[in-house]
Amino acid sequence: MQLKTSNSNAKTESNQHGQEIQPFGTLLNLSSPQNLLSTLQELRQTVESEGQVTFNEWKLHIHRTEFLSSALNLAEYLALRRHDLRSLQAALMPWGLSSLGRIEGRVMPNLDAVIATLEVICGSESAQHLNRPPIEFFFEGDRLLQQHTEELFGHSPPQRRVRIMVTLPTEAATNYEMVREIIQRGANCVRINCAHDTTKAWGRMIDHIRRGEQETGTPCKVMMDLAGVKIRTGQVLAPLDKKRVFKGDHILLSRCEPELGSKAGTSPVDYFQTCCTVPEILDLLTVDTLVYIDDGKIRTCVVDTQYSVANGQTGLLLQVTHASPKGVKLKPEKGLNFPNTVLPLSPLTEKDLSDLDFVAIHADIIGYSFVQRSADIELLQQELDKRFEGRLTRPAIVAKIETAIAVSNLPELIIYAAGKQSFGVMIARGDLAVEIGYQRLTEIQEEILWICEAAHVPVIWATQVLESLVKDGTPSRGEMTDAAMAERAECVMLNKGPFIAEAIAILDDVLTRMEAHQLKKTPQLRALHSW
């Protein structure tokens, strides 16, 4: 039997770095256990050597010796996933062997276990001398992920592995009973968004959390999310006869606010006009650059970089390429995304640096927005060093992955962060979907889970989880499926809303039920009760 990959007649695939993805086992008769054994031995040797090269490049940036084995496993996993293993997987299954589909947390132990068993099947003389990995070593990756998750979020509740994080509303500063109920219903961590409220309000929220912990006997971590760079629309000036933007319309995106209410602002205009709250970004944009507004509800491209209109405004002229057939209202304070543009912006603003004086002392975890490069991780660590000079304990960091560059650089972000302190990753699916596209998001959110599991790094599944339930009191079928999928992460985040208490209880139930059926990528064959 000649096994081939499903795309054997297609051109050689490449990853995003231009490296060719090599198929293993396409030229061998993999129905033979001897051929399987030699193929796996070759694969193991390749993974070990390539992984070691990557690991050696990373070692200088790892200051926590306890993270070294996790970093090595990540390097080996990346080396493994440079190859197309689908034919090899199919060939392993009839022999009752692991198909390598759940190898993330234990690359070498898994390969060694399969090779050892194949040597027995083949009657290899060397089989008795092979060091089959001990059981405790085989499951060491699971133990490390659990350890790192407990370092970040504390011990798991007795009924489930996955934690629940809840975003606190402003009222949490004045309503203790609300905070207490959030903890009682099952929240294991709360999120304070530093884009809103004041240090005084944050302090009151944290006081309520600590009081709630004592009264309920339930520990609850505090994550304070630095506001980061907020790229938004400014005031909007619309043509007199139009209230909504349609496909084919034009928008002038300028560096300064339209002069609303002035003579210039009250005169008729041909185009919708608004500004960018971070005007220096406009200097980076060229013709055909994509500009998405309001979470992609309005999608545009640049058609002119030096456009002037009758009321004296100049800026970039955008043409709308996508909008609802009913039109979309262009509003102030809506997000701007630039999917095909690299933005060389610091993720820490002056406000963030000021807020960090409070956050560094009071938060258990710091949420870090707009992280894209390892230098961004180093920047926050340096700021923490200034505030923790001579002290060993410091808050953990959670990097929010929300751009294509952050996805590409994820392994390096993990090494620089987890190599120095407790660390987690948040899949910020809102901005990420706008940046990379909704179709690509479905694939990337899975790959982020795999990469993080290979590094034994906990993941937060975030954005619009049970959103209809939180806001309106009634969930949708799609939301319930999404919540069930979230069981593969280590934490699930709910946003604020009037029905948050009910949402926590339902999510708690869903996660508890799903844990009996699924553990990360591994199905759990609990006895079925419906048949």
Image (spheres, rainbow, N blue to C red):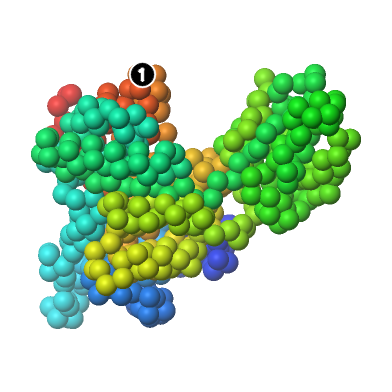
Given residues 207 and 94, the one toward you in this image is: 207
Residue 324, relative to residue 416: is it above or below?
above
- Residue 384 lies, in percent from the top left, at 36, 64
| Residue at the disc numbered 1 | 474
The quadrant in which residue 98 appears is bottom left
Given residues 178 and 113, the one toward you in this image is: 178
Can you say which quadrant of the picture contains the C terminus?
A: top left
Q: Is residue 212 left or right of residue 48?
A: left
- Residue 119 lies, in percent from the top left, at 21, 72
Q: Is residue 244 left or right of residue 148?
A: right
Q: Residue furthest right?
A: 310
Identify which amino acid the numbered label 1 is placed on: Thr
Residue in the picture at 28% in, 46% down: 222
Can you say which quadrant of the picture contains the N terminus?
A: bottom left
Whether residue 284 appears in this view of the structure is yes
- Residue 174 lies, in percent from the top left, at 30, 30
How crowded pointer 1 is (Cα within 10 Å; few <14, some 14-19, many 20+) is rated as some
Residue in the picture at 42% in, 44% down: 194
Callout 1 secondary element: loop
Whether residue 301 appears in this view of the structure is no
- State the count of labels: 1
Q: Is residue 177 left or right of residue 387?
A: left
Residue in the picture at 79% in, 45% down: 315
Residue 97, relative to residue 475: is it above or below?
below
The quadrant in which residue 326 appears is top right
Given residues 365 and 118, the one toward you in this image is: 365
Residue in the picture at 19% in, 58% down: 147
Q: Is residue 55 left or right of residue 371?
A: left
- Residue 28 lies, in percent from the top left, at 41, 68
Residue 293, relative to residue 357: is it above or below?
above
The quadrant in which residue 512 appears is top left
